[in-house]
Each structure stands twice: as structure tokens, then as C-alpha cells.
Amino acid sequence: MKVENIESNKGNKIANQFVITDDIGNQYFQSYNSMIVKKPLEVWNKIQLDQKYWNYSNTTGKYRNIFLGETITETKKKIKSGEYILTDLNK
């Protein structure tokens, strides 16, 4: 498992915002102590967002957008279309 601080658009490491890569290549975005996004290695599996925390705060949203490489509007469209799923990533 590998844990790194997420980087801002300017390349600065951001405290309390993490990209985690597990041993099989799945990537996760964690904000403070909450898991926000799971991006599976397999492209046929859907990206999962935590149903409670995926849009918890402006800070979470800012770094979630960087992690996913998209805007909140695009993320909401993908949730609505079923391309992304909401689930409990913090069990």
C-alpha cells in the first residue's frame, strides 16, 4: 500500500488530503479520516463515491475534483447517469 499527499494544481503537497494506492492498484482519495472516492484499477468497475462525504465541504470537493480530473457538475452527471455509484466507503 502506498500513501501520498494529494498535490494542488501548483504541485504543492496538501496536508490531510491523501491518494492511497492499494497492493492491486485501486486508488482512493481520503480527506482527513474519511474515504471519499474509490477508483478501481479495472476500468469496467464503476468509480465509487462515499454517499455521506463525497461532497462534504468545499475543501473536500476541491481535492476530489483534482483526484477525479473533473468538475462537480461532471461528477453529479455521472452519479445521475449511474456511471458513478454512491456507497458507504467508511464502514
Image (spheres, rainbow, N blue to C red):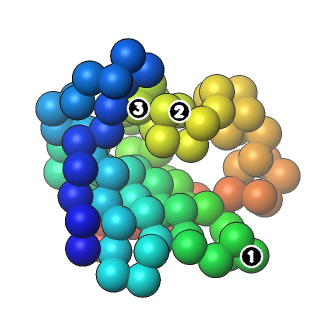
Q: Is residue 88 visible?
A: no
Q: Residue furthest front?
A: 11
Three-letter amino acid code at the position of disc 1: Trp
In the displayed structure, 81 sits above or below 44; it is: above
Residue 30 as seen in the image, left or right of residue 66: left
Image quarter of the N terminus: bottom left
Task: Give the labeled residue for mark 3.
Answer: 63
Task: Give the labeled residue for mark 2.
Answer: 65
Q: Residue furthest top?
A: 10
Q: Residue at x 45, y 74 (%)?
A: 25
In the displayed structure, 46 sits above or below 71; it is: below
**Neighbour class for label 3 at 10 Å: few (<14), some, many (≥20)?**
many
Distance from the alpha carbon under mark 3 to that under mark 2:
5 Å
**Neighbour class for label 1 at 10 Å: few (<14), some, many (≥20)?**
few
Residue 17 as seen in the image, left or right of residue 53: left
Task: Give the labeled residue for mark 1.
Answer: 44
Distance from the alpha carbon under mark 2 to that under mark 1:
21 Å
Image quarter of the C terminus: bottom left
Q: Position of residue 29 (x, y in %)?
A: 38, 51
Mark sitting earlier along the chain (2/1): 1
**In the foreground, 24 or 77:** 24
The picture quadrant where one finds residue 62 is top left
Q: Is residue 3 visible?
A: yes
User: Are the residues at dot 3 and dot 2 in contact (C-beta closer than 8 Å)?
Assistant: yes
In the displayed structure, 12 sits above or below 5; it is: above
Mark sitting earlier along the chain (3/1): 1
Q: Position of residue 39 (x, y in %)?
A: 53, 62
Three-letter amino acid code at the position of disc 3: Tyr
Q: Secondary structure at mark 3?
A: helix
Distance from the alpha carbon under mark 3 to that under mark 1:
24 Å
Three-letter amino acid code at the position of disc 2: Asn
The picture quadrant where one finds residue 74 is top right
